Image (tube, rainbow, N blue to C red):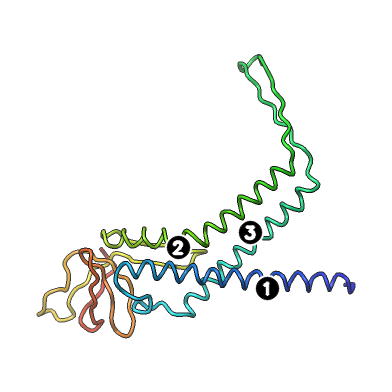
Amino acid sequence: MSTSKLAGVSEWAAQATQITTGVAGLSYAFGWILMARFYGALGVDPEDVGITFTWLVVRAFLVGLVVLGAFLAVRWLQNRAASAQSTWITLSVGTGVRSLAEVRLSLPGRYLLRGLAGALTGFAVVFLVVLPFRLGDHFAADALAGRPVDFGVLGTTVIRAPEVRISSADPAKPSPAAGCVLRLGGNAGTSLFVVGGRVLRVSDQNVMVSSSC
């Protein structure tokens, strides 16, 4: 491989690393705002349910890779827009046998591609800035209403509050809650559940959790 090609590959790799790192940082902020919004509405901290720095960084990095792919797609569309030809669209009015009128419209290809690139950019901005607040409020309302929450990105769980059934570890004592409840998570030997619109903290030694509900 020639020196010029190696230099081009190195420059591309450096730019990709910068973009991925920057987007991963924004994604980390996105995730933390989402967690703080969701769990804050329930009156708990993300750390109380086992959300750690490493747990969130891994997911932020995956989102960064996805946004890098979107960025490369936008750059490709912008480069293609400069050399794109006009697109002709024919609108025909009539029956299946005979056409009564036809109109031909010329759509400059470069404008179409630039519009698509702008749409992708706008989606990324809205995703990173507005969505965590809306999603956090929406999921918190679902959890308080007793509806299960399951939100993930690229096959990894971000927020999950499944329905479970809990019973007392001591058969002589009554169950902390009757029927199905939502499990938020746990940390340091304490699990958190949503029961009747409020958060219940129970020691793991005092309850048994069943996933069948």
Q: Quadrant of residue 72?
A: bottom right
Secondary structure of residue under mark 1? helix
Amino acid residing under circle 2: Pro
Amino acid beneath label 1: Thr
Q: Position of residue 33 (x, y in %)?
A: 44, 69
Q: Quickly name the residue at label 3.
A: 70
Q: Which residue is mark 1?
A: 17
Give whichever of discs 2 and 1 has the lower sequence position.
Answer: 1
Q: Residue at x 85, y 70 (%)?
A: 5
> Gap between marks 3 and 2, in whole Å?
19 Å
Q: Position of residue 152 (x, y in %)?
A: 45, 64
Camera-side residue of 69 and 45: 45
Mark 2 and mark 1: Cα distance apart in space: 25 Å
Judge the density around disc 3: few (<14), some (14-19), many (≥20) Cα neighbours within 10 Å. Answer: some
Secondary structure under the numbered disc 3 in the rendered image: helix
- Report the label total: 3
**Quarter of the image where the C terminus is located:** bottom left
Hey, what amino acid is under mark 3?
A: Ala
Find the distance from the CA under tag 3 to the CA under tag 1: 14 Å
Q: Secondary structure at mark 2?
A: helix
Name the residue at 35% across, 76% down.
Answer: 45
Q: Earlier in the sequence, mark 3 or mark 2?
A: 3
Circle nearer the viewer, 3 or 2: 2
Q: Counting other residues with Cα less than 10 Å from the Cα at mark 1, is it few (<14), some (14-19), or many (20 or more)?
A: some
- As displayed, is residue 161 above or below residue 92? below
Closer to the camera in the image, 98 or 145: 145
Q: Indicate left or right for 199 with 118 as reference.
A: left
The residue at the point 72 percent across, 26 percent down is 104
Residue 91 location (% of width, % of height)? 66, 25
Question: Which residue was labeled with disc 2?
Answer: 132
Depth-wise, is mark 2 or mark 1 nearer the camera? 2
